[in-house]
Image (cartoon, helix red, strand yellow):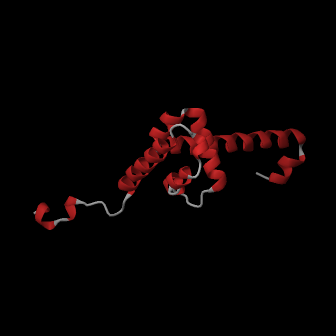
Amino acid sequence: MNLRKLTSNPISFCLLTIVFEIYNRQYWFRVIGAVAEDYPGLNALLGEKKFDSLVLAYLKENPSTSIYTSESWIELPKWLEGHPELAPRRHDLLVDVARLEWAYIEAFDSASVYNPWSNPILVS
């Protein structure tokens, strides 16, 4: 498909702009959804709207540099420490929940998880 041909026609250009906007919005919905899966406790504590705002604020200050979603959130607990305005009354709880949920992510994604099938004594 010739992009120059598409953009020369005003109607095609408008349609192309709409398609790109839809893609852009869907990308952010997917990012927020992925983070909500990794941090369900934070999502529950803050509520959906505040959680979405937290994700977007974090990404503004810490843009993703990895193709792996979870690697983008390494600094979230530390970042939350410096942002008490997100939940003034429950800030300490918020930080603790973020640390706990990050620990779960690290434990689950760890490459050094013990594999009992690699032990020749157990396998034989």
Splitting the image into 4 quarters, where does residue 56 fall? top right
Q: Quadrant of the C terminus?
A: bottom left
Q: Give left or right: position of 15 versus 96.
A: right
Left or right side of 39 for 110: left
Q: x, y percentage for residue 3?
A: 80, 52
For image coordinates 60% across by 33% down, the residue present is: 49
Please count the marks in the image. Answer: 0
Residue 52, placed above or below residue 79:
above
Determine whether, in the image, residue 123 is placed left or right of residue 89: left
Depth order, front residue of 96/6: 96
* Residue depicted at x 46% and y 42%: 93
Farthest front residue? Answer: 89
**Residue 64 sits above or below residue 29 on the image:** below
Question: Viewer-proximal residue, 110 or 44?
Answer: 44
Residue sitting nearer the eye, 94 or 117: 94
Q: Does any portion of residue 122 appear in the rendered image?
A: yes
Rendered location of residue 54, percent (x, y): 60, 43
Q: Residue at the location (24% across, 60% down)?
A: 115
**Residue displayed at 41% across by 51% down:** 105
In the displayed orientation, state which residue is furthest to the bottom: 120
Answer yes or no: is residue 29 visible: no
Quadrant of the image occupied by residue 63: bottom right
Q: Quick one: 51 or 18, which is closer to the camera?
A: 51
